[in-house]
Image: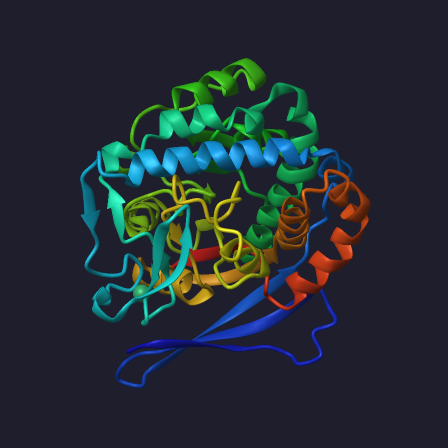
Amino acid sequence: MSHWNRTARLDAADTRQIETWTLTAEDGARRNFEIDVKTGKPLDVMSLKNSSLADTREYADMLAARARKLYGSGLRLVEMTSCTCCGRPLTDAGECLRIFDVPYQRCTGCGHVMVTRRPAGEDLDFEESAEVSQTYVDPATCEVRLAQVIAPKMDWVDGVFAKLRGRKTTTVIDVGAGGGHFVEGARRAGATAAGFELSKASRAFAKAAFGLDLRSDDFLAANLEPVDVITMWGLLEYVQEPRRFLDKARAVLQKEAGMLVVEVPRFDALGTAAQAVNPFHVARHMDPTTHINCFSDASLATALVSSGFAPVAAWYFGMDAYELLVQCALRGGDEKALSATAEMIPALQSALDAARCCDDIIVAAVPV
Ligand SMILES: [Zn+2]
């Protein structure tokens, strides 16, 4: 069985450092990848302070009902037999988490976490999931989101690309573009950007908010010219076969020219643990109604390398401290607990990010 090791400094006081990720193949052959690592991301504590506990509880109840519908007796569930990232048979995989009574299993080869008994592709209805997440594409919060979430990501992408290719990013394809925020952010940064989005509601939002015409066709089947950067922000956790998206990106991107950027949820995180012990109050992260995959650093790296990429940069951050405080407040039934403790979040989260115990990661990779 192949495996990954991380070589990092013990005195990791810096939020920027170089790590070596080493892949040792079954035959003992080793490949080293030098990774430009960033940890931590500024958080808008005021907006977290204002989130209502009642809304969170209501949203979690809605997801629980949806999980009963998706995984209940009504639908045919498909049983996976091998890991979607490393291909290892799941015969020795064990249950690692159960949310809304839906079990997640963990691959013993690469640590990838999956809902292995899942509805067939057509039953995981993204139109519906897009509608239930309308607050995510609320026009009123658009500019705030562009400034606080999108611009820092575009800056990071541009910085990694410039270091590799010696110039700014000029062309971008965003796959699973949602309400078009990143496409708009890339355009504002001077790039020509296009986006693929299957949800009609999200495409309508992108048109209304930014005048964007996102593509409704299937990225996997599209005939595409090479671009500088392909991005997949929070996409691979939704899809039945993440490798197909990576393979397609590899086919589009050119060696010595292109770069792929993927953001995925991380399993080995405090946020996961906080949800594991409160499995009926989940409103984000390990939500089996949409997130059928959750990654380990090794499973993401394995999938990238198997699709012909070499990872070059990683950014660790998350919402774990917020998640923990939300779960504590929900348990205590105390509406004020979250606003009273919200100021603690940035410091707590920064420590978790530095320790790579956070629930999110962005990795940049280049075609090899
Ligand atoms: Zn695996």
Identify the residue at image location x=48%, y=37%: 172
* Rendering quadrant holding ligand 1: bottom left
Q: Which of the image's four quarters has the C terminus?
A: bottom left
Identify the residue at image location x=38%, y=33%: 66
- Quadrant in the rendering for residue 55: top right
Above or below: residue 154 compared with residue 305: above
Whole-percent x and y of residue 299? 38, 63
Tell me if 130 is positioned left or right of 87 in this view. Answer: right
- Quadrant in the rendering for residue 216: top left
Whole-percent x and y of residue 182? 55, 34
Identify the residue at image location x=30%, y=26%: 217
Which one is nearer the viewer's eye here, 26 or 309? 26
Q: Which of the image's four quarters has the N terminus?
A: bottom left
Q: Residue lying at the far bottom in this picture: please name it.
A: 28
Instruction: Give the colouring mode of the picture.
Output: rainbow
Tell me if 92 is positioned left or right of 329 in this view. Answer: left
Whole-percent x and y of residue 183? 52, 31
- Quadrant in the rendering for residue 143: top right
Above or below: residue 93 compared with residue 230: below
Which one is nearer the viewer's eye here, 29 or 163? 29
Whole-percent x and y of residue 146? 65, 32
Q: How many marks?
A: 0
Identify the residue at image location x=43%, y=58%: 295
Q: Confirm whether residue 171 shows in the render.
A: yes
Which one is nearer the viewer's eye here, 250 or 182? 182
Q: Confirm whether residue 197 shows in the render.
A: no
Tell me if 104 is positioned left or right of 334 in this view. Answer: left
